[in-house]
Amino acid sequence: MIESITYFLLLIILTGCNISVYLMCRKMLRLLEDAMLHTDSAKHSIETMLGHDPTSGLNTRLNELQKMKFSYMRTNSGGQQ
């Protein structure tokens, strides 16, 4: 009789520990998932800000910046002469 009560109490304690560990792991996974989503959204924001488009690529934006630089240099050098 005492053994069955002991086993029953041990089962309740172990079940409670397992549930608390499960909840803690679930919370940690949720935090990790949120951090990953935040990183992805930050990466997407940076790519959008840089003009990165999967269809055209980043080189298009770099070419536009180089053209702007050359036209600026041409305008300034022409004004000094």
Image (cartoon, grey):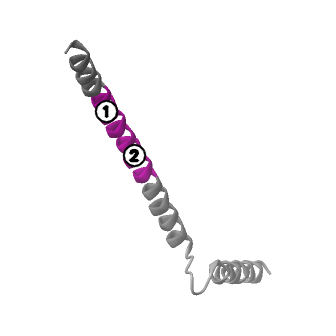
Residue 64 shown left or right of residue 77 in the figure: left
Q: Position of residue 30 (x, y in %)?
A: 37, 48
Question: Could you say which is closer to the camera, residue 2 or residue 23?
Answer: 2
Amino acid type at circle 2 is Leu
- The residue under the point 74% across, 78% down is 73
Sequence-first disc among 2 and 1: 1
Question: How busy is the neighbourhood of tag 1: few (under 14 within 10 Å), some, or many (20 plus)?
Answer: few
Looking at the picture, does residue 19 appear above or below residue 80?
Answer: above
Q: Which residues are magenta?
A: 14-35
Q: If the image is split into quadrants, where does the C terminus sit?
A: bottom right
SS state under label 1: helix
According to the image, label 1 marks what residue? Answer: 20
Of badges 2 and 1, nearer the viewer stands 1
Question: On the picture, is 52 further left or further right than 71?
Answer: left
Q: Identify the image quadrant of residue 66.
A: bottom right
Could you tell me what secondary structure mostly forms the magenta stretch? helix
- Quadrant occupied by the N terminus: top left
Nearer to me, 46 or 29: 29
Label for residue 6?
Answer: none
Name the amino acid type tagged 1. Ser
Measured as percent of width and height from the top left, residue 72 is found at 68, 79
Q: Residue at x 57, y 76 (%)?
A: 52
The residue tagged 2 is 31
Q: Is residue 15 magenta?
A: yes
Q: Is residue 28 placed above or below 80 in the rendered structure?
A: above
Above-or-below relation of 26 to 62: above
Question: Callout 2: helix, strand or loop?
Answer: helix
